Amino acid sequence: MLLVVAFLTGAAVMAFEMLGFRVMAVTFGSLDIINGSLIAAVMTALSVGYYTGGTLADRWPRPSLLGGLIVLAGLSIVFAPEVAKRIGDSSLSNPERTGTWGPLVGALILFAPASVVFGMTAPFVIRVTAPRPEVLGRIAGKIYAISTVGSIFGTLFTTFYLIQWAGQTNALRIVGGMSMLTGLLPIIWSAVRRTPPGAAALALLTMLVAVGLAEAKVIYKRDSTYHQIEVHESEIGGRLLRMLRFDNSDQSAVDLSDLDAAIWLYTDYMHLSWIFKSDPKRALVLGLGGGTIPMRLHRDHKDLKIDVAELDPVVEQVAKKYFNVKEDDRLKIHLGDGRQYLRRSEEKYDTIFMDAYHGGKYGPTLPFTLCTQEFFELANKRLADDGVLAFNLIGQLDNSTQLTRSIIKTMNAVFPTVYIFPVDFKRYPGLAEKRNIIVICTKSKTEVSASTIVSRAKALVENRKVTVRNYVDNAMDLLTKELNLRSVKVLTDDSAQPDRLLQP
């Protein structure tokens, strides 16, 4: 019986930790320091559990005691989503107030109680099951092997199946409920051996705390391997908008009465690439989202063939069902990582549009693998000789953080000319304003002046090659001020640290 408990608690601790990465990403953001905080918290708690479990087992070697503690650990996992939400709403999730310590403290609050108990299991089981001191080593090895096999099972089952089938919140409750049932095993075993099993029936009542998902005001909700995906509708300014959300950040929006209207200005600014390549025949879009960019390209440019690289197959399904995305002979969606698609592709693109973000505590987060020197060199290789890259950045251009300036400096290290268009810059000219920033990178060594950019924009509108509203005004948002790039580094696969780049 106790060997089964060792296996199941080994599975539970890794299932809890795998789910923990998603919980921490939603609560604090998707940064290296967040993952490090979770791992450190769990390892610390397990260490405390190993020591405490051995001490308790020597003093009170009763399986029912271990079972009761495991039941409580399962109960804490069941309520983990509610605790995470409260932490996310507190000052712990504000890096300006807690710095790098907030995620670590939050991880300890969320994951330490259950992890301490799971750490206690192996030494407790060793103490209870070892019949003679001379076989203690063999028993210890056996218990830790069984527990580790359980951990392997918990890792694979959770990441390959449980999250996709049940979703993050329900998965936590399932893991918590199974942990509580695991805790009941030694309680029942002890009760059957010594007393009537009435106490076990009472313990079973604790399972009633596992409730279903609270009703959400959304029309679609699902956890995929990569995102917690929601589609919801809101009436704003007399328009019914349908929104696509990853985790805590909105990714796409459409007006249900006008599917081609741009809700977010940055999608119109992506069309500024026509100023530098006015007759593209083939385009690649990295990141599908709700399909706003590829579908507008498809509608406006009848001679343009469009490939879309999207990592998440569920996003593709949602885009087609809820955002009117349709494939045909001019628009093809390719499932897989955008960078890997570029590596495998043999196509030469006239324009590459980069808009691949995932959700985070403070809004959309850019995967660092899509903003390093190696990535831009790969994109440059896949562009035609006169091709351009249009890159959607989200951030600030002043010295408050390094991230945006580091990415721009990295672009400069690869492309001869880089043009920066902060969205709505004429109305809000401050560099400290957090906003979408469309960066156009070209392979041409001849820099185009601001006046020429505006002249070309006017010609494109007059010739009906571009039908985007306020196109000329958007072109006037070109940033002509030189940025301070001396204090930031070029990002590489080897050295990029996204969490550090958020620091001044």
Image (spheres, rainbow, N blue to C red):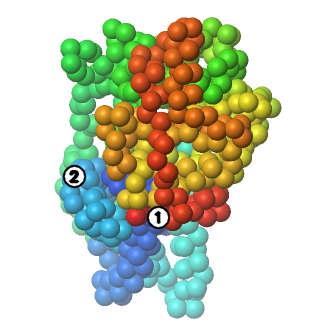
Choose the circle earlier in sequence order: 1 or 2. Answer: 2
User: Does the image show residue 279?
Assistant: yes
Image coordinates for residue 124, horizontal then vertical, percent: 40, 78
Residue placed at 31% from the left, 34% from the top? 427
Spot the residue most to the bottom. Answer: 134
Q: Indicate the quadrant containing the C terminus: top left, top right, bottom left or bottom right.
A: bottom left
Image coordinates for residue 272, horizontal then vertical, percent: 53, 26
Residue placed at 53% from the left, 73% from the top? 143
Q: In screen coordinates, is 266 left or right of 307?
A: left
Residue type, mark 1 in image: Arg
Q: Which residue is mark 1?
A: 500
Q: CA distance from mark 1 to mark 2?
A: 23 Å
Q: In screen coordinates, is 46 left or right of 412?
A: left
Q: In screen coordinates, is 20 left or right of 487?
A: left
Quarter where residue 84 is shown: bottom left
Query: Quick check: 5 above or below 240?
Result: below
Q: Indicate the quadrant containing the N terminus: top left, top right, bottom left or bottom right.
A: bottom left
Question: Which SS class for mark 1?
Answer: helix
Q: How many callouts does the rendering have?
A: 2
Of the pair 372 and 55, the residue shown nearer to us: 372
Mark 1 Cα shell of 10 Å, populated few (<14), some (14-19), many (≥20): some
Residue type, mark 2 in image: Asp
Mark 2 Cα shell of 10 Å, populated few (<14), some (14-19), many (≥20): few
Image coordinates for residue 425, horizontal then vertical, percent: 37, 36
Image coordinates for residue 391, horizontal then vertical, percent: 55, 37
Of the pair 464 and 331, the residue shown nearer to us: 464
Q: Which residue is mark 2?
A: 89
Residue placed at 61% from the left, 34% from the top? 448
User: Does the image show residue 187?
Assistant: no
Mark 1 or mark 2, whichever is nearer to me: 1
